[in-house]
């Protein structure tokens, strides 16, 4: 059976890291006798340059015609790139928000896992991460503040801007169900993060999560306020299994969690709708400062490709093989610059984007 993969190489380091993920997918295809067919899709800054807008109807149609989409990263340097002279709805980020909405990708999975080998790259004290951590951040991706009514207008003679945080019960229920389903396959704990001491949307969130929780008696469900969650993540990250939260809180907490894994370059992600379709992208940005240098860490993108194998193609063995190969490359001492330890450690070898991709391909069991 042939699997159709849409490829959004994107901007900045995007093309470099996507090339390594495709190299790994091709190695998987050869080893396990699969056939992956790739279709290039333009989005973000690259689409602005070619088509004048960050997301075209053709791009959406091409994504919909694929079984899954692999994406690098989009966007440029906000200070220097001409893309940021455009109105907000024409900038690269609008393309990403637009494709998530157009494809109904409401469930964003961001696994944050501390590899034993990267403990030195973790900014937390050794005793705090002695037992590592392994959490899945489930971020609602097509509602909330990023999609609510917004505007800038004059009120009482003052320029006034507003954004609204809106959720209906169905939007909360479907992401909650996903989170509990995933918790059932993990350590059976869901911590729902909100700001229910202040926000109405959070109070509804909490109520619906409790209703869903009643259908999963085996899963331990707790609630935590988002400010406390930000603190608990650095105090005791091992307490978390699945973190379930709304769009903006998830955006912020997932960046925080990514740093705990050693680097933003380690955090993969999957954005899923009701079907098997998914868009897979590293959680980090386009890193314009190092674009074109060939030194970016491709691991988050390669791990995102592994998530594609698991969630869109039901290829669990293949996904495990890729994850195992990443682990082995780290164990054998290979590091890109972002995860190099501060002091000299014998057996640690610095490599670049391509070198890391090759190391991982060589270790596919
Ligand atoms: C992310 C990014 C995006 C988001 C931006 C680029 C719109 O920060 O995927 O976390 O906020 O969702
Ligand atoms: Mg973000």
Image (cartoon, rainbow, N blue to C red):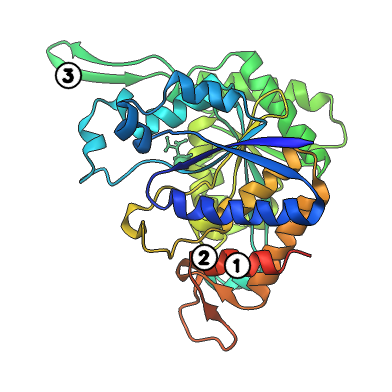
- Left or right of residue 149, residue 20 in this image: right
Q: Which residue is more in the foreground, 173 or 5? A: 5
Q: Residue furthest bottom?
A: 346
Residue 62 appears anywhere in the view:
yes
Disc number for residue 358: 1
Foreground label between 3 and 2: 2
Residue at 74% x, 26% y is 177
Q: Residues within 10 Å of mark 3 (few under 14, many from 20)?
A: few
First in sequence: mark 1 vs mark 3: 3
- Left or right of residue 38, residue 324 in this image: right
Label 1 and label 3: CA atoms lie apart by: 54 Å
Q: Residues within 10 Å of mark 1 (few under 14, many from 20)?
A: some
- Residue 317's spot in the image, x, y percent? 82, 52
Q: Would you name the residue on which mark 2 appears?
A: 354
Q: Residues within 10 Å of mark 2 (few under 14, many from 20)?
A: many
Task: Say which quarter of the image contains residue 89.
Answer: top left
Q: Quadrant of the N terminus?
A: top right
> Is 198 located above or below residue 335 in the figure?
above
- Left or right of residue 146, residue 277 in this image: right
- Residue 231's spot in the image, x, y percent? 52, 51
- Residue 98's spot in the image, x, y percent? 45, 24
Q: Are marks 1 and 3 in contact (CB under 8 Å)?
A: no
Q: Would you name the residue on which mark 3 appears?
A: 159
Label 3 and label 2: CA atoms lie apart by: 49 Å
Give the SS element for disc 2.
helix
Q: How many marks?
A: 3
First in sequence: mark 3 vs mark 2: 3
Disc number for residue 29: none
Q: Which residue is more in the foreground, 83 or 106? A: 83
């Amino acid at each position: 059976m042939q699997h159709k993969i849409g490829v959004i190489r994107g901007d900045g380091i995007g093309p470099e890291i996507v090339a390594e993920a495709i190299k790994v997918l091709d190695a998987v295809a050869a080893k396990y006798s699969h056939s992956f067919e790739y279709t290039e899709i333009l989005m973000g800054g690259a689409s602005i340059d070619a088509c004048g807008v960050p997301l075209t109807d053709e791009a959406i149609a091409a994504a919909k015609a694929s079984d899954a989409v692999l994406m690098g990263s989009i966007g440029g340097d906000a200070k220097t790139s001409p893309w940021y002279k455009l109105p907000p709805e024409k900038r690269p980020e609008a393309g990403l928000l637009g494709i998530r909405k157009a494809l109904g990708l409401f469930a964003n999975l961001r696994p944050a896992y501390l590899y034993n080998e990267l403990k030195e790259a973790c900014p937390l004290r050794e005793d705090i991460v002695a037992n590592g951590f392994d959490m899945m951040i489930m971020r609602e991706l097509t509602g909330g503040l990023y999609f609510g009514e917004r505007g800038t207008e004059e009120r009482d003679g003052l320029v006034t801007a507003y954004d609204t945080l809106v959720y209906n019960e169905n939007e909360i229920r479907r992401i909650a169900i996903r989170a509990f389903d995933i918790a059932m396959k993990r350590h059976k704990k869901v911590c729902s993060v909100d700001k229910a001491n202040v926000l109405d949307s959070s109070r509804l969130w909490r109520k619906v999560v409790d209703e869903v929780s009643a259908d999963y008696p085996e899963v331990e469900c707790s609630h935590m306020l988002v400010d406390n969650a930000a603190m608990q993540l650095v105090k005791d990250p091992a307490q978390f299994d699945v973190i379930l939260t709304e769009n903006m809180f998830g955006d912020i907490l997932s960046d925080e969690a990514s740093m705990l894994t050693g680097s933003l370059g380690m955090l993969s992600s999957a954005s899923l709708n009701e079907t098997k379709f998914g868009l897979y992208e590293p959680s980090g940005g386009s890193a314009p400062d190092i674009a074109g240098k060939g030194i970016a860490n491709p691991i988050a993108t390669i791990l995102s490709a592994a998530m594609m194998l698991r969630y869109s193609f039901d290829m669990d063995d293949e996904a495990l093989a890729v994850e195992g190969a990443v682990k082995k490359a780290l164990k054998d001492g290979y590091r890109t610059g972002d995860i190099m330890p501060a002091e000299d450690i014998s057996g640690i070898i610095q490599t670049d984007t391509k070198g890391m991709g090759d190391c991982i391909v060589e270790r596919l069991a």
